[in-house]
C-alpha cells in the first residue's frame, strides 16, 4: 500500500486495523473516507482463515505436498478434503470408518490419503475421488492413533494404543514389518525419517524410540527426559533431529542418532503440548496445545517467535506448516480448522459474526477484508488493485445485492 495510488487508501484504509502501521501513518492524510461502524480490528490477526463446521471435533489435519489442500479426520468418522485457500470442500466426505478418525496423512505425491481410526483399522483413499484404494488394513488390537506414509509412498507406518507399531504395504495392505514391541503404553505418534530408513515413535510411557523401518530393531536406547506422556514427535527435514511435545508442557529437540537432548526443554506452555512440527526449512517449530493456543518457536534460540496465537476454543490436536513456511494449519476439538500467518502473533482479534451470516474474517495483503458499514456488509477485495463493494441482504428475494463503490 505504501507505494500504491491514492485510491487504494480511500478504499482500504477504513478496514485496516486501527493500530496497524498503515492506518497509523496514513489515516490522518485521508480524514474524509468511509468509516466502519462496528467490527473494525485494532491489529491484523494471526489467523488467515477459519473453516467451520468440519464434521465434528477434528482429531487430525494434514497439508498436501503442494500446500493447496487440507485433509481432516473427525470424531464423526469422516475424512474431508478442503481447498487450502478458500476453505471450500473439494470432495464429498470419505466414509467407511465406523468410529473416530484419529489420524490422517497425505502421501508425498499427493495422490492418496491414509487414515487410522478407533475402529482399529487403517484405510487408504484416493485423494481426489474419496474411493478406498486399500483396506481396511487389520492387525492392530486397539485404536490406531497415528499413521504416516513413507517418503517413497510405498509404505505406511501406524502406531496404536495396543502399544505396537506396524509397517504396511500402501498398495496391497499387507503387513511388511512388525509389530514392533518395546513401548509399555500407548504409541501416540509415529513418522518415517526423510530417507525412509527409520521410524520415530512417542509414547505415553514417556519415552521416544527410533526403529529400523525394515527390521523393527531399535537403533538407540529410549530417549528419556520428558516427565509425562509424549504426545507428538517429528523428524527435522534433514533427519538429524527429532522434536517432541509432551503432557509435561515442554518441547524437546533430540539428536536423532544419539538420543541426546540438543535443545530444550522449551518452557512457556501452560498446558499439554498435543502436536508439534518442524517448518520445511528447519528454522521453526510449531506447537498446538490443550488450552487451544498455538506457538511458534525458533529452533536456534528456543525462543518464542509467535504466539500464543488464540482463536481455537478447544484443544489443538494437529498442526502443520505449509511448504513455503509462511502458513500454519491447525485442527481442533472445537470443530474448526484455522490457517495462520506463521510469522505473526497477534492474539487480540479473531472471527467476527455479522448479520447472522457465516463469520467474517480478515486477511492481510491478499484475499478478502470484510467489515460492517451501517446495514451494509463491506467487502474489500485486494488483488493488484482495490475494488470496493457493499452488500445488503434482500429479504424479498432471499439473496445479497452487491453495489460497487470504486
Image: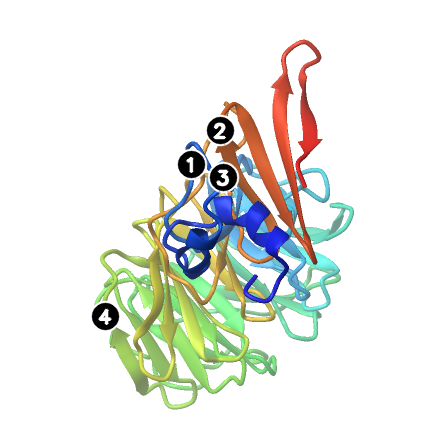
Instruction: Work out how far the residue at label 3 is from the one at label 1, CA to CA, in angstroms.
Output: 33 Å
Quarter of the image where the N terminus is located: bottom right
Q: What mark, if any, has residue 75 been given in the picture? A: 3
Tell which tag, 2 or 3, sits nearer the viewer.
2
Tell which tag, 2 or 4, sits nearer the viewer.
2
Instruction: Work out how far the residue at label 1 is from the one at label 2, CA to CA, in angstroms.
Output: 8 Å
Q: How many marks?
A: 4
Mark toward the start of the polypeptide (4 vs 3): 3
Tell which tag, 4 or 3, sits nearer the viewer.
4
Image coordinates of residue 71 in percent, x first then y, are 61, 51
Tell which tag, 4 or 1, sits nearer the viewer.
1
Q: What mark, if any, has residue 39 been given in the picture? A: 1
Mark toward the start of the polypeptide (2 vs 4): 4
Q: What mark, if any, has residue 354 been given in the picture? A: 2
Instruction: Work out how far the residue at label 4 is from the one at label 1, CA to CA, in angstroms.
Output: 35 Å
Whether residue 44 is visible, yes or no, is no
Mark toward the start of the polypeptide (3 vs 1): 1
Q: Residue at x 36, y 42 (%)?
A: 313
Pointer 4 residue: 267
Q: Residue at x 63, y 59 (%)?
A: 5
Tell me the SS state at disc 1: loop
Quarter of the image where the C terminus is located: top right
Instruction: Work out how far the residue at label 2 is from the one at label 4, CA to CA, in angstroms.
Output: 38 Å
Amino acid at each position: 500500500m505504501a507505494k500504491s495510488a491514492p485510491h487504494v487508501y480511500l478504499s482500504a484504509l477504513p478496514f485496516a486495523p486501527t493500530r496497524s502501521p498503515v492506518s497509523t501513518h496514513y489515516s490522518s492524510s485521508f480524514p474524509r473516507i468511509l468509516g466502519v461502524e462496528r467490527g473494525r480490528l485494532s491489529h491484523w490477526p494471526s489467523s488467515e482463515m477459519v473453516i467451520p463446521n468440519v464434521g465434528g471435533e477434528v482429531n487430525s489435519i494434514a497439508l498436501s505436498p503442494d500446500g493447496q489442500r487440507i485433509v481432516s479426520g473427525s470424531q464423526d468418522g469422516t475424512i474431508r478434503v478442503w481447498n487450502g485457500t478458500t476453505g471450500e470442500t473439494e470432495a464429498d466426505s470419505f466414509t467407511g470408518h465406523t468410529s473416530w478418525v484419529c489420524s490422517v496423512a497425505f502421501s508425498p505425491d499427493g495422490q492418496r490419503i491414509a487414515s487410522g481410526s478407533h475402529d482399529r483399522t487403517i484405510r487408504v483413499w484416493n485423494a481426489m475421488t474419496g474411493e478406498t484404494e486399500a483396506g481396511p488394513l487389520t492387525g492392530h488390537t486397539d485404536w490406531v492413533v497415528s499413521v504416516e506414509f513413507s517418503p517413497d509412498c510405498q509404505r505406511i507406518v501406524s502406531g496404536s494404543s495396543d502399544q505396537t507399531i506396524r509397517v504396511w504395504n500402501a498398495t496391497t495392505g499387507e503387513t511388511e514389518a512388525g509389530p514392533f514391541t518395546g513401548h509399555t503404553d500407548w504409541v501416540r505418534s509415529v513418522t518415517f525419517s526423510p530417507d525412509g530408513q527409520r521410524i520415530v515413535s512417542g509414547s505415553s510411557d514417556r519415552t521416544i524410540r527410533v526403529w529400523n523401518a525394515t527390521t523393527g530393531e531399535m537403533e538407540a536406547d529410549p530417549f528419556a527426559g520428558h516427565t509425562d506422556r509424549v504426545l507428538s514427535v517429528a523428524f527435522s527435514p534433514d533427519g538429524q533431529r527429532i522434536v517432541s511435545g509432551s503432557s509435561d508442557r515442554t518441547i524437546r529437540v533430540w539428536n536423532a542418532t544419539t538420543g541426546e537432548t540438543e535443545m530444550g526443554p522449551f518452557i512457556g506452555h501452560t498446558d499439554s503440548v498435543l502436536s508439534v512440527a518442524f517448518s520445511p526449512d528447519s528454522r521453526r517449530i510449531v506447537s498446538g496445545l490443550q488450552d487451544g493456543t498455538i506457538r511458534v518457536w525458533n529452533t536456534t534460540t528456543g525462543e518464542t517467535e509467535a504466539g500464543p496465537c488464540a482463536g481455537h476454543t478447544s484443544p489443538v490436536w494437529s498442526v502443520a506448516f505449509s511448504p513455503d513456511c509462511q502458513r500454519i494449519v491447525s485442527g481442533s476439538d472445537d470443530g474448526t480448522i484455522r490457517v495462520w500467518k506463521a510469522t505473526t502473533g497477534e492474539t487480540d482479534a479473531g472471527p467476527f459474526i455479522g448479520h447472522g451470516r457465516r463469520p467474517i474474517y480478515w486477511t492481510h495483503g491478499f484475499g478478502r477484508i470484510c467489515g460492517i458499514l451501517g446495514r451494509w456488509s463491506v467487502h474489500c477485495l485486494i488483488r493488484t488493485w482495490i475494488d470496493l463493494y457493499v452488500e445488503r441482504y434482500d429479504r424479498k428475494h432471499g439473496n445479497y445485492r452487491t453495489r460497487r463503490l470504486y
